[in-house]
Image (cartoon, coloured by chain):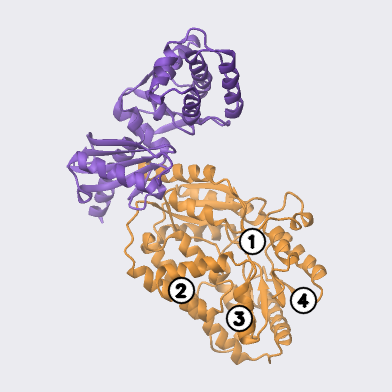
Chain colours: A orange, B purple
Amino acid sequence: MELNDIVRRCEDLYHDLDLTSVKEWKRRTGGKAVGFLPIYVPRETVHAAGALPVGIMGAGDDLEIIRGDAFYQSYICHIPRSTVELGLSGRLDCLDGFLFPAICDVIRNLSGMWKILFPDKYVRYLDVPQNFDERLGGVFYRQELAALFQDLCALTGRPASDEALRRSIEAYNENRRAIAELYRLRAEEPHRVPTYEHYLLMRASNVLEVTEHTALVDAYLAAARRENRPWRDNIRVILTGVFCEQPPLGLIRALEQSGCSIVDDDWVLGARYLREPVAAEGDPLDALVTSYLRRGTPTATRYIDEDAKGEDLIRRVRTLRAEGVIFASPSFCDPALLEAPMLQRALGAEKIPYTAFKFSENSGQLQVIKEQTGAFADSIKLWGAA
Amino acid sequence: MIHTLGIDVGSSAIKAVAMKLDDQGGGGTLAASHVNKIRKRSVKDVVLQVVERVLQEGGLSREDITYIATTGEGEMVDFRNGHFYSMTSHARGALFLSSSVRAVMDVGALHARVMLMDSRSKVLDHRMTSQCASGSGQFLENISRYLGVAVEDIGRLSLEADKPEMVSSICAVLSETDVINMVSRGVSTPNILKGIHLSIGKRLINLLRMVKAEGDVLVTGGLAQDAGLLAVLQSLALELGLKVRIAAHPQSVLAGAIGAALWGGYRYTKLKMKEAEV
């Protein structure tokens, strides 16, 4: 598959708010589809139940919000508005269920609204532990996962089988391997993997069946290595804060155009939330629990020691030879905005340059952000150590 | 000796230069330059034409160029090596054209801004026009077309004014209405043009005051060639008692491209040194 064909396919999937690809999958397989919101849900459970996990990350700047605004105050972020709009306009009708993982109060409330708005659909608020002791949080989380898996199997009519779960874990491990390779190639040779393409490829993981997505990433990697793209004198930056509401495509392009090569990010974080493969032997639910407790990404919704998050960011800056950090926070996103000062303090102590701005998924005025990141890139290139 | 290319993609014209630098990326002489208006053509095509012309004039080939740097809207030039922000490039270009400069007034087709800088051309502060019609260059060009005046004649005619009439400084649409009224009232073309210069000039001088500029100020961008605007800026600065000397350079329009090319040379040698260290 040629590079342009892969990118075009990903673009089509990104803009397909009607979830045509999901409907096609359902027609082809006769299976059910279960939606989920950011950041992390154990997609293995959905997959093992025979359903297609479908990540919904709002509607970007592709949809005018008409009814969604009536559900939220003006000081609430944008993703729940566009999600409601997608739901009420019938675009998510092909989803037989919807999972709302614990991320913030807004999303928790959205799960309640969803139950009222769509009473005939399976809706579950997935509570995740904030106690990382296996005897406490671990036991709780295992019960949550077991109940979730039972529910999903009841929805699809499949038996709740450990063997099916193990096979799904293996499939997702393979996907994590491909995604890790994608991130590695971009960090080593950013000019080979433009941020725009990288992002679209990650977004495709939301709607494609996992093995299909793995094959697509592998095909992209092979094509990107073949492609002769000019080297770019950009600064290497880590982008953080985009774990839930996503920046519009124009903003993602603008960051790179302004002279920043993104070498790590937290967009579509659910696809690589577990940093290592999950054990495919033994009790599969235990394996998922252990991975969540021990190998989850230190992000805003994980209430761990604040120093640990700063240390993790600094370690990534050093390992990836990043020259700066960009904090891109969705407007009114409490998790991102409350996290940023703690991370900035850690960076400041290490004299690592950073810049911060806010966006919304439908931001149209990008010039100011472009000027800010452009000036940031120049300050590092011309007056910094880069 | 190395050669670098600087391409400044503006909203109405493409400016490109080839610079000859020493092996350390220092020194710097202008080897070739070319400016071409976009005039509703494909920007990419005009960029390619301008670049080819510069290479030809400089007796260079693409292979002789060690670093291709863009500025302005040059992010869409896919054969670039690096891109520099407009303020950074204009400051560096201004310093190249006049070593005593400590502030730059960049007046382009769609925007105007003032930058305060140090002796290394590091930007210390800046202000941009924020209102509609801040794009004074394009506005002036539109008005000259309505008046049947060639763009090159605007400055000369403005200098002939004896009783200028001010136009609205808020909005391009209102200003255009002002001009139509003036024409119907029989106000002479020089007086209309000087009125526009005064309107633009007051806002630019205000930007200079806001950054607390002192000493030599270089006007860059397309309007640097407008003698009428320059005269207005100088007289307004004098009236307001600002401690500045405002001037333009014959190559002011190339400041962005020159700055980008010089920064490109700097980056090339810096990266080479880093590579050697590794």
| N-terminal-most mark, 4 or 1 | 1
On screen, residue A315 versus residue A339, left or right, reads left
Of the pair A159 and B231, the residue shown nearer to us:
B231
Which label lies toward us, 3 or 2? 3
Which label lies toward us, 2 or 1? 1
On screen, residue A252 versus residue B73, left or right, reads right
The residue at which mark 1 appears reads as: A59
In the rendering, at what x and y percent does residue A364 appear? Answer: 59, 48
Label disc, if present, on residue A217 of the rendered structure: 2
In the rendering, at what x and y percent does residue A204 appear? Answer: 54, 70
Same chain letter for marks 4 and 1? yes
In the rendering, at what x and y percent does residue A335 appear? Answer: 65, 57
Disc 2: CA contacts within 10 A as few (<14), some (14-19) or many (>=20): many
Label disc, if present, on residue B167 of the rendered structure: none
The residue at which mark 4 appears reads as: A121
Mark 3 is on which residue type?
Answer: Trp
Mark 3 and 2 residues: CB-CB less than 8 Å, in contact?
no
